[in-house]
Image (cartoon, rainbow, N blue to C red):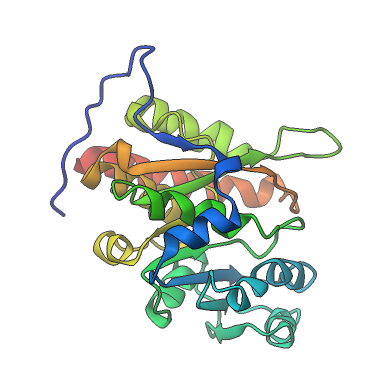
Amino acid sequence: MSVSLFDRRSPAGGPSPVKRFDAAALTHEAVRAAKGTTTISVIIPAKDEASTIGGVLAAVLPQVAAGLVEEVLVIDDGSSDGTAEVARSAGATVLTLEGGGGKGAAMAEGLAASQGELVVFLDGDVENTTTDFVPRLVGPLLLDPEVQLVKAFYDRPIEGDASGGGRVTELSARPALRLLFPELADVRQPLAGETASRRAVLEKVGLEEGYRVEMALLIDVGARWGAAAVAQVDLGVRIHRNRPLSELGPMATEVLAVALERFASF
């Protein structure tokens, strides 16, 4: 892969090259005005999310009628709890990965099946998805042609505390970025499932398998277009189920592996 290498020197206290957009300025009206004829697809990879996928879709599907989004696809990653049925009943188009394929495979399936020039990925396990998610994620892409990838950031409560969630992020992903790719160190939620990008970008860099996908996409975009091509926007508070350590360990291993692989190859 042909890339422009990162400047791996730390910004040394200077301004971060990663852009941060004011969420308050990314109103539904402002984003619809900036959209013009640009087409937007929303893709939601989901595995055993029957209890939450309906709420996610309730926040997203009305934006089709409002003219902001052209299509909403749910990619059912081999669920056994009726996730697909709930999503279809809500009005989404549902594709099923037979036998499951992992998050990266589900995202790739959704990318291949969708048509939008801009692509928004949302997680299906979030309990408090709001109608602000999509306009805030696509707004930077519409308003700034330099931006190629938008990552959400948010507070993540855990066990009654207002913050402290995102253990793989704080103990694996962000330390890896600080050490190996310091220009991306200011990205607060590098593993956020709430992500938006340009179709051409996603097709060029590809989507990695499993839980490697978010870290790989962030690093690949930064390497090819520079850290200034990455933007982040505040989505407030993200409430979802917190996974046990038995599941987080393998996730952390995948995240560290892809960071080390990219560092060695760049």
**230 relative to 171 in the view: left or right:** left
Q: Residue at x 84, y 39 (%)?
A: 159
Residue 108 higher or lower than 257, as above or below: below
Q: Residue at x 61, y 61 (%)?
A: 123
Report whether residue 193 is seen: no
Q: Residue at x 70, y 61 (%)?
A: 125
Q: Residue furthest top?
A: 13
User: Could you tell me which quadrant the N terminus lies in?
Assistant: bottom left
Q: How many marks on residues?
A: 0
Q: Nearer the viewer, residue 102 or 19?
A: 19
Q: Nearer the viewer, residue 230 or 136?
A: 136
Q: Position of residue 209 (x, y in %)?
A: 41, 63
**23 relative to 140 in the view: left or right:** right
Give the image quarter of residue 115. Answer: bottom left
User: Could you tell me which quadrant the C terminus lies in?
Assistant: top left
Q: Position of residue 170 (x, y in %)?
A: 57, 32
Q: Position of residue 17 (x, y in %)?
A: 34, 29
Residue 25 higher or lower than 114, as above or below: above
